[in-house]
Amino acid sequence: MNTIITRLDGTIYDFDAIGITTRDFVVSSPKPRHFTEQVDARSGLIDMGTVYDARPINASFYAKAVDNADYALMRDEIFRMLRSDEAFYVTESRNPGKRWRVKVADSFGLDQQRLYGFFDVEFVAYAGVAESIGTTLDAETFEFLDLPVSELDYAEIRKLSFRVYNASGRKIDPRYDSLVISYRGVSTNLQIQNVTTNETWTYTGTTLADDEIRLDGVRATKNGLSIYRDTNRKLITLAEGWNEFVVSGVPTPKRSAVQKHAPKNTETQRYNPFAFEFTYKFL
């Protein structure tokens, strides 16, 4: 078993490669937090929904130094790698397609036994969920996940109706999760409808071939400038599993030429593309 630490600046610490052995890596089950209401003269409670709290992760390690002088340097380097003034990502080798954004919950020390230092660390994942190691537009995201899609299914989508797969164990909501939906090209009164969730986003404006519409979280922009007031002020979420989409206000896709000697459509003649970028979330 191995553990990999990835700092937010991209620095990676592979524990095996630097001589730290992972003895155990224990992820607790999700901890539910239930909301209820009580009504007078009525038995029981009314279920008002459930959310999940932060998740503790308990890990055990040992490291081996070259000599006593090296032991102190090794100890300080471990403290530096796991500093928690900012969050970082931790990944276990048994589940290389997922990572946890964590901080260290409390102080810890190394139990020195000759040149070995044994230590236990409690991480806390405040989001309560793991996430894919990359976004839907990164090929590495799908390397260790057994999914019916690849990164090619989320970029250069050139259809009037299509499906988007959300492998998360829950809904992706742009108010709380990173979700970017983009469209590049010509449009008039662009409309994006998620039939699965019965949600529709509309823009009462026009775009040209080089323009880009971006729905980034709760923001809607055209070429980086806000168009929020020209929209219906709605959001698009992604349900777990397949989401059926229908779009309008864009040019109809041109058919490929069927005549033997007719020129084929160039890339600029084809219908302009949508892209969906987000990370999967896992309980």
Image (cartoon, rainbow, N blue to C red):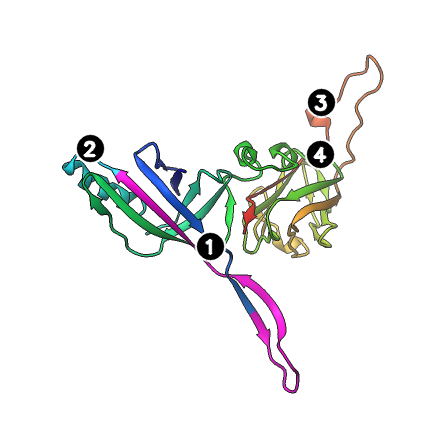
Q: Residue furthest bottom?
A: 41
Upstream in sequence: badge 1 or badge 2: 1
Task: Write down the quadrant of residue 245 in the picture.
Answer: top right
Which residue is depicted at the point 58% across and 52% down?
174
Question: Position of 116 compared to 166: left or right?
Answer: left
Which residue is disc 3 drawn over?
Answer: 266
**Residue for badge 1:** 28
Along the line of sight, which residue is nearer the eye, 94 or 279?
94
Residue type at tag 1: Ser
Q: State which tag comes first along the sequence, 2 or 3.
A: 2
Disc 1 + disc 4, Cβ < 8 Å: no
Task: Please state which of the two labelled residues, at mark 3 or mark 4, is closer to the viewer.
Answer: 4
The circle on residue 158 is: 4
Q: Is residue 22 left or right of residue 189?
A: left
- The alpha-carbon separation of the residues under discs 4 and 2 comes to 58 Å
Number of other residues with Cα within 10 Å of mark 4, as a class: few under 14, some 14 to 19, many 20 or more: some
Please say if 260 is above or below 27.
above
Give the CA separation, mark 1 to mark 2.
35 Å
